[in-house]
Image (cartoon, rainbow, N blue to C red):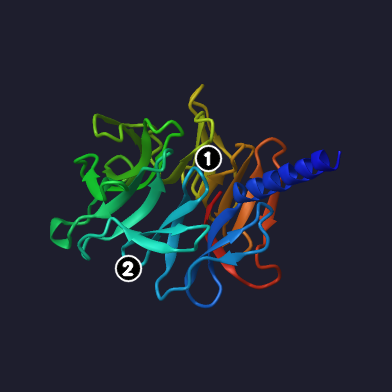
Amino acid sequence: MIKNRFTLITIFLVLLCYGNAYSDIALVANVDGNWDLFLTDNNGKNPVRLTNTLYDEKAPCWSSDKKKIVYATSDGNLNIVDIDSRETFQIAAGKAKTPKISPCFSPDGKEIAFAQFRPPEEGDDTDLMIHDLETKTSKRVLDQPAIQMWPAWSPDGSRVIYANMHCSGECGRLIQELWIADPKGGWARQLLMTNSLCQQPVWSPDGRKIAFSSDKSGNYDIWVLSLQDWQLKQITMDEGLDVSPAWTLDGDKLAFVSTRSGKMEIWIKDMKSGGLRRMRPFGDRDVECKDVAW
């Protein structure tokens, strides 16, 4: 009986640790003048600092096993931090004149999609790239003109969604639409035609929806596209900017960055009840937060 009770307690503790490891939230916060990478628990509390550098960290993305985070830095490099060891190493190192942005792990953790600027002499342009972590080599996915940003993998790894910027003669301004592509470079096509600036797309865990930020309604808000019936739904409506959406692992909630309080903070939308709450990882301290990843 004692042995069985001890076994049950052990299993419970293992599951508890497993659950905590798989529920942490990554974010970027400006605590002391620089944007650094932090972790919080699933309730958005108890922040733990992961970086403390001279550069600004941005755009964190979890590996699917929640053991690593890839992120960009303001010097144009990409880095991976190991959550257990806290060790950090640089990846996809290349020419200093070709900064890299918006990295994202593939579902199997073997590759990282990112956007890379071309050399200045080639104009204001970026390429959609994929870095192989085993061979330590990077390849261009598409030879597509203009600026591609914010790639995100589908849950099955068969597609990559991203934002592509171009000029629209009809509306007389720059347009940034969502595109979807074969990560092997076989094809690419435009997903939506909104005549607006769409950015930071993310797949829901079940692969049935895509959340993104757009100024389609005149102000940056969070939108969700259903890939089952192609219904496009506006999730937030506020005079502040709502950007950088991130799904919970069960797909029931969306975290996003908002300026509705007068500064950048993280808010969480319950997709079932419609409830909205503000996340305050640093308590009453006046700390701005952005680039949330669940």
Percent x, y for residue 115? Answer: 30, 50
x, y percent for residue 82: 47, 57
In this view of the protein, which residue sits in the foreground, 169 or 233?
233
**Mark number displayed over residue 215:** none
Between residue 49 and residue 268, name the one nearer to us: 49
Q: Position of residue 88 (x, y in %)?
A: 41, 63
In the image, residue 259 above or below residue 254:
below
Tell me the element at label 1: strand
Q: Residue at 58% of width from left, 53% of height from top?
A: 25
Could you classify mark 1 by the number of other residues whose Cα lies within 10 Å: few (under 14), some (14-19), or many (20 or more)?
many
Q: Residue furthest right?
A: 1
Q: Which residue is mark 1?
A: 223
- Residue 157's x, y, as percent? 39, 33
Q: Given contact means CB atoms under 8 Å apart, are the residues at marks 1 and 2 in contact?
A: no
> Circle 2 sits on which residue?
75
Q: Residue at x 49, y 30 (%)?
A: 207
Residue lying farthest to the left in this orientation: 121
Amino acid type of the residue that numbered disc 2 sits on in the rendered structure: Asp
Between the residue at mark 1 and the residue at mark 2, the CA separation in whole angstroms equals 31 Å
Left or right of 112 on screen, residue 96: left
Residue at 19% x, 41% y is 143
**Residue 94 in sight:** yes
Q: In the image shown, does 194 or 139 lie closer to the viewer?
A: 139
Callout 2: few (<14), some (14-19), or many (20+) C-alpha neighbours within 10 Å?
few
Horizontally, residue 141 falls left or right of residue 108, namely: left
Task: Give, as a three-letter code, the residue at label 1.
Answer: Trp
Quadrant occupied by the N terminus: top right
Which quadrant holds residue 273?
Answer: top right
Q: Secondary structure at mark 2?
A: loop
Between marks 1 and 2 in the image, the one whose residue lies nearer the viewer: 2
* Residue 14 drawn above or below residue 205: below
